[in-house]
Image (spheres, grey):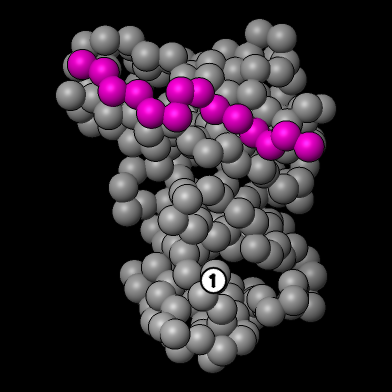
Amino acid sequence: AQTVTQSQPEMSVQEAETVTLSCTYDTSESDYYLFWYKQPPSRQMILVIRQEAYKQQNATENRFSVNFQKAAKSFSLKISDSQLGDAAMYFCAYRSANSGGGADGLTFGKGTHLIIQP
Amino acid sequence: GAGVSQSPRYKVTKRGQDVALRCDPISGHVSLYWYRQALGQGPEFLTYFNYEAQQDKSGLPNDRFSAERPEGSISTLTIQRTEQRDSAMYRCASSLGTASYNEQFFGPGTRLTVL
């Protein structure tokens, strides 16, 4: 079974600064997808960014980018020019490219609570 | 358009009672997923449907938990003889198709409290 580890329960950053959230995962598969989800105080789950394992190029979405290191099984999220609205729980998630045995669902880490200081 | 909706948003029940949680996916979305999120944890996969067929229920904790999606749209997650350890946020998500790259859109969740 796959596991996702987020080793930073909480991170704090000054507004307008850059912050990096860490995520590592364990899998024996070669084909999979990785995601970062944001959960603001409203408790919604919002997709921030997605990375296909077969793509070497790191995904970017405006101020959000990832550093995907497949050999190291690492998938960190960088938030540039942090804004007050970025304050939330951030979850890293893994999904297999296969089916069955729970592979169809997302496997989430425990989350990192991001605090933005004005 | 409308997103994924869930009802009720909050449910308080007494231990031993049955509860039914409803999920209304985005119109046209083929796949529907159920997750459970305990406080301070990430969501945990429970089960998933492709149209009306339950494709994977390996994440259901025990046989008190069941789910159905009889017409391939609305789904109901039922917990029988609830226990205090069942207290959690229950989330539903839907996606256009079953392919792994399809984004799963999450509903607001149902907060279940078992007294």
The quarter holding residue A111 reads bottom left
Magenta-drawn stretch contains B2: yes
- Give the residue at x 56% y 82%: A82
The residue nearer to you, when weighing B64 against B93, is B93
Residue A4 drawn above or below residue B37: below
- Give the residue at x 64% y 33%: B4
Query: In the picture provided, is B26 more to the left or to the right than B77?
Result: right
Task: Look at the image and give the residue range highlighted in magenta.
Answer: B1-14
Magenta-drawn stretch contains B95: no
Residue under numbered circle 1: A86
Query: In the picture provided, is A52 more to the left or to the right than B36?
Result: right
Residue A118 is situated, as x and y percent measured from the top left of the image, at 44, 85
- Give the residue at x 39% y 68%: A113
How many discs mark residues in the rendered view?
1
Residue A68 is situated, as x and y percent measured from the top left of the image, at 65, 76
The quarter holding residue A56 reads bottom right
Residue B4 drawn above or below residue A62: above
The residue nearer to you, when weighing B70 against B55, is B70
Q: Secondary structure at mark 1?
A: helix
Kindly identify the amino acid type of the residue bearing the numbered disc 1: Asp
Residue A102 is situated, as x and y percent measured from the top left of the image, at 55, 37
